Image (spheres, helix red, strand yellow):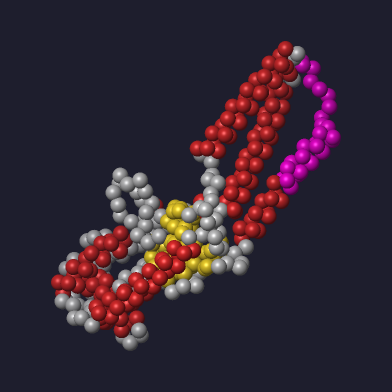
Amino acid sequence: MAIRRKLVASLTILMSIMLSGVVQAASDLNMRPGVTETSIAAYDLHMMVIWVMTVIAFVVFGAMFYSFIFHRKSKNPTPATWSHSTKMEFIWTIIPIIILIFLTIPAVKLLIKMEDASNSDLSIQVTGSQWKWHYKYLDKDIEFFSNLKKHDVSDENYLLDVDNELVIPAGVKVRFLVTADDVIHAWWVPDLAVKKDAIPGFINEMWTNVPEDKLGTYRGQCTELCGKDHGFMPIVVKVVSQADFEVWVAKKDEERKLAEAAAAKAASENWDMDKLMALGETTYEAKCAACHKSDGTGTPPLFPALKDSPIAIGPVADHIDIVVNGKTGTAMAGYGAQLSDAELAAVITYERNAWENNTGDRVQPAKIQAFKAGNE
């Protein structure tokens, strides 16, 4: 009896260690509770499963250790003659079934709720590209690209900030339609309990509704290995009040009108080579050098060289087409919606005259504007 009491005490200590590990994991290494109703429900379900697993582990390992000690050969030199127990087999079959049903019912209910994006108040198309995100508000005349923001390595949010945040209002159901331009990406913001693969040619749907008392900035990442700059596709979602959201929408409308006016002004000018090359080099380094390299040699076969390439020294119209529209089935994304007409004209001019390509061609913003209008 003394040995058994010691065994029970040892198992109790083991249980305490296991439980302390669970508590520690809950605070340091566990999944985030998040800020939405669904994220909190997912966290609660996760913790319930952890506790169930802990109890099961305690019972199973306790039975094993008990058997090791009290049914060892030295204590029972004569082996038992029975082979099995139908009653015990029935019990250890029924109990797991009951546990699975107990866990499955709330899990299925939560999954159904998380997949129901109907009756949304705002719809946003999320498109993944190498290596940026394109956001389009389907209920508003707003769309923009979100790229990694360059900042100092000492910054608290180093590699986690973007140049254009996704802004959504609190207290409304926001539906996300997720797809991709080139390869498979994945859009994930853990605090909002949203994560979907972005697959070319497919649209995946999800939603979130952030409470009005949870305003703030929430960060995520691309979670599908999508190429060499996969680790540089952060996601930043800024949740604001509905009043502030309307102010932001009005600001975006004003920015769009100013951009249209600037494009019209640029198209009316005749740019000289120096001006085009200066802007072209800046644009190329920011948007193109990651794939084609600063010296234009590229990294074939995935990212072909632009130096002496058939595109860069061939017909101008073909060069404009591939830069504006991209090339289906390759990593070459279209930049027609990402860059202004002036930037497009400048970068094409730069590519046709840098690295000893020396075609002498000057592509004007007006030519880009005409191409987009279908008049070129």
Q: Which residues are magenta?
A: 76-102
Position of 212 compared to 230: left or right?
A: right
**23 vs 224: above or below:** above
Residue 81 part of the magenta segment? yes
The image shows residue 224 at horizontal and vertical percentages of 47, 55
Image-quadrant location for residue 294: bottom left
* In front of the other: 2 or 355: 2
The image shows residue 219 at horizontal and vertical percentages of 44, 52
Principal SS element in the magenta part? helix
Q: Assign the N terminus to one quadrant of the image.
A: top right
> Can I make out residue 203 in this image?
no
The image shows residue 335 at horizontal and vertical percentages of 34, 70
Image-quadrant location for residue 115: bottom right
* Residue at (66, 23) in percent of width and height: 11
User: Residue placed farthest to the top in the image?
Assistant: 2
* Residue at (69, 46) in percent of width and height: 103
**53 vs 343: above or below:** above
* Residue at (30, 46) in percent of width and height: 153
* In front of the other: 142 or 300: 142
> Can I make out residue 163 in this image?
yes
* Residue at (64, 56) in percent of width and height: 111
The image shows residue 146 at horizontal and vertical percentages of 38, 62
